[in-house]
Image: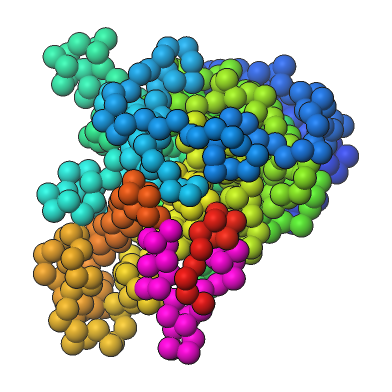
Amino acid sequence: MISNETTNGSKRGHDDSNNEHKNTKKATIVQNSSSSSSSSSPPTATQYIIPSSQYTSLPPELQSINFTNRISWRKFKPYPNTTHNLPLTPIHTQPTFIQNTTKAALDFHIHAISKRARATTIHLPKGRKVPTPIFMPVGTKGSIKSLTTEEIMEDELGGLNCPIILGNTYHLALQPGTELIRDVGSMISAHSNGNDVSASGGGLHEFMNWKGGILTDSGGFQMVSLLKLAEITEEGVTFENPFENNVKSDDNKDYSNEHDDVDTMNDNKNDNDDYLSSKRMLLRPEDSIYHQNNIGSDIMMALDDVVSSVTDDNERFTIATYRTLRWLDRCIAAHSKPNEQNLFAIVQGGLDVSLGGLREKCLAGFMKRDDSIPGYAIGGLAGGESKDDFWKVVDQCCKALPDDKPRYLMGVGYPLDLVVCSALGVDMYDCVYPTRTARFGVALVRGGSGTMRLKSNEFYNDHRVIMEGCKCQACAGGFSRSKLHILLKRGNPLATALMTNHNIAYMMYLVRGMRDAIMEDRYEKFVNDFMKDHFTGKENGGEDIPQWVRDALDAADIKLDIQ
């Protein structure tokens, strides 16, 4: 259920808490209240609410920590200052789930490492398993635009076969509503189990007929992507109705590394749902978890206080970092299905990777709560920060987070980023880039720039497929670049479906190749081959390897044999 009201007494554009921070994007932070979002959601856990005068104070649980040393826990070789080898699990080992622990709904098996890169399997309930490294296509509202569930999951050509996709809590709560998803999913599941309601699971899996894994974003990212519509309080974040405000995309902005917020709003701006015309959505940590419990995702994300990585406001980052810890406590308290669904925490702290800095403090807070966290995400990136800042945050988090739990880098989907960040130790990724760029007629390919702009006239008479050996519907189906060029120029929906299928197939091809290389302990060679394909050097009419890539791979002990 979506709340009709925001926090009591709040005023848009006004801050009653002694100007607790200056927001460069004009989002409003207002004094918190004890109001609840809906009668169905758990009430606000007021024991975690603090007065605004304490927003920038070091949380009590961190006051005894020695921040003169780097934060890390349960680390193994090859990470610094470690003496023991990482325990490995044979690839066909059956999972063991232990109720009332962080292994109740997730068993994490590490099969091989190659330098810091690792090949693992994330075992989830009901036999679902996710091999890593993995890229998760984004199905914001429970579907990937232009593709059917069967195409994504049970591709006869073997090009896709995605084991897990991502859905968005904010958008699913707006439309069609998570109660509807829960109830309709339960009816479908009960029918398939001979009307045995006790055996029904319900949720988005049944609603969209999806047998694989589902990860849901908490809605925190919308604090950045829909910042102009948001009011952020200690209690939660209140969003204006985006349809009422008729938000449109900026043609001059690169949305490739963002979630589908702008596209989704534009798709639905003409919907005549009366209930959307006046609603203001208050999303508290309790509401986010309530909605995700309804959705039934295998992996849920805690609601975090997200600040754009390019914001120049240290106080705002401090408030957000400490608030993320308090909101995590509220998420854990509100989680009603810990033996069925996993709740991941999201590391925040801006770009501050200094000793004792904000990222360290957030990591230290999670270390204190580790017994309640089955996996970790690295958040607050892919928002326009420099690549040098980007990789240093990823490197710091991978060096700190425990080796026996999954690591998920949020909102990252450029192939180069996956190759580099997997070398640093990341397991999971998601991004709209492959599917959104497909809708603009851009195919992902091996070598060169890594992309092929099929709307360009150079492909008018090119009768080759996009990429030889690709198992997508376009390439395996014999659709030439020329044919796709014509379909795209005419706006034929078939072109969008074929391009989307190809780009997801490319991402699956990439991560499977990465996994195979790690399993065979040749990831360093894989990285070198990838770099040779994509960076031929300016003297050869191509591009040189960016310095940030060299620096990141050097940190990962990956030696490049090309200059």
What's the residue at 54%, 26% (across, down)?
Answer: 373
Asked whether residue 562 is in view, the answer is yes
Q: In this view, does 465 lie above or below 133?
A: below
- Horizontally, residue 160 falls left or right of residue 232, namely left
What's the residue at 64%, 63% (across, down)?
Answer: 388
Give 222 or 110, whichever is nearer the viewer.
110
The dominant secondary structure in magenta is helix
Q: Is residue 415 above or below residue 467?
A: above
Q: Image quadrant of residue 363?
A: top right
What's the residue at 50%, 40% (across, down)?
Answer: 407
Residue 184 placement (x, y as % from top left): 28, 26
Give 398 or 114, whichever is nearer the viewer.
114
Which residue occupies the extreme front position in the image?
A: 83
Q: Which colour scheme is used?
A: rainbow
- Horizontally, residue 548 falls left or right of residue 10, namely left
Magenta region? 524-551
What's the residue at 50%, 35% (across, down)?
Answer: 85
Give 57 or 422, whichever is nearer the viewer.
422
Residue 302 placement (x, y as % from top left): 55, 32
Q: Does the magenta stretch include residue 309?
A: no
Q: Is residue 316 above or below residue 180?
A: below
Residue 402 placement (x, y as % from top left): 56, 33
Asked whether residue 173 is in view, the answer is no
Residue 367 placement (x, y as % from top left): 65, 28
